[in-house]
Image (cartoon, rainbow, N blue to C red):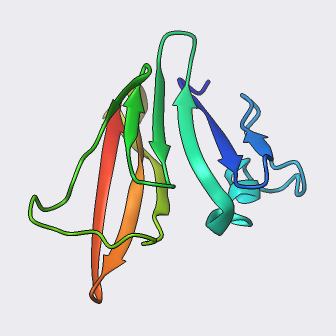
Amino acid sequence: MLDYLFEAHLTDGTLIQQTQEDVSSVRADKSAFYDVAQRLEEVAFFGLLNEKHTFVVDLRDGHFEVDGVVFDLHPEPSLEIPAGTPYRLIYFRHHKRHFSGVVEIAHEVTYHLGWQITVAGKNYQQTLAVK
């Protein structure tokens, strides 16, 4: 069972939502993120949500939101980000499994979302890690 489900809001108004089944709407052998990956350049904002919390990265200007509270994170305080710089989505889940012998006794998932930009030929990124 996934602790958080994603929503990807595209620039044309399309909404791609993950379900607990985590299956692509166009290819049954792929995860729901496959649908997002086919249109990555069109993602306006991307969120993780459950019944208690919402985490959002806005790829139009790079700001983040946690439960409606807006904030900015910058990879370097002095970095000037030129207007029109495209923000590219970062999203992945990190799985950590704990074993006692050959028996899995715990499974932790950390969700990562954020952005990557390129300024003057150098890549920068900023992510949130949600447990």
Q: Name the side, left or right, on which 7 lies relative to 14.
A: left
Nearest the viewer among 79 and 131 is: 79
Q: Is residue 98 above or below residue 88?
A: above
Q: Is residue 99 above or below residue 122?
A: above
Q: Is residue 112 above or below residue 20?
A: below
- Figure quadrant of the N terminus: top right
| Residue 11 x %, y % | 70, 55
Question: At 47% from the left edge and 17% from the top edge, which residue is drawn?
Answer: 53
Quadrant in which residue 75 is drawn: bottom left
Question: At 42% from the left edge and 72% from the top edge, which residue is drawn?
Answer: 85
| Residue 51 x %, y % | 57, 10
Q: Name the side, left or right, on which 109 lies relative to 44.
A: left
Q: Residue furthest front?
A: 83
- Figure quadrant of the C terminus: top left
| Residue 119 x %, y % | 29, 80
Q: Name the side, left or right, on which 89 lies relative to 81.
A: right
Nearest the viewer among 115 and 102 is: 115
Q: Is residue 27 visible?
A: yes
Q: Is residue 107 visible?
A: no
Quadrant in which residue 5 is drawn: top right
Q: Name the side, left or right, on which 20 lies relative to 120.
A: right
| Residue 54 x %, y % | 49, 23
Nearest the viewer among 131 and 59 is: 59
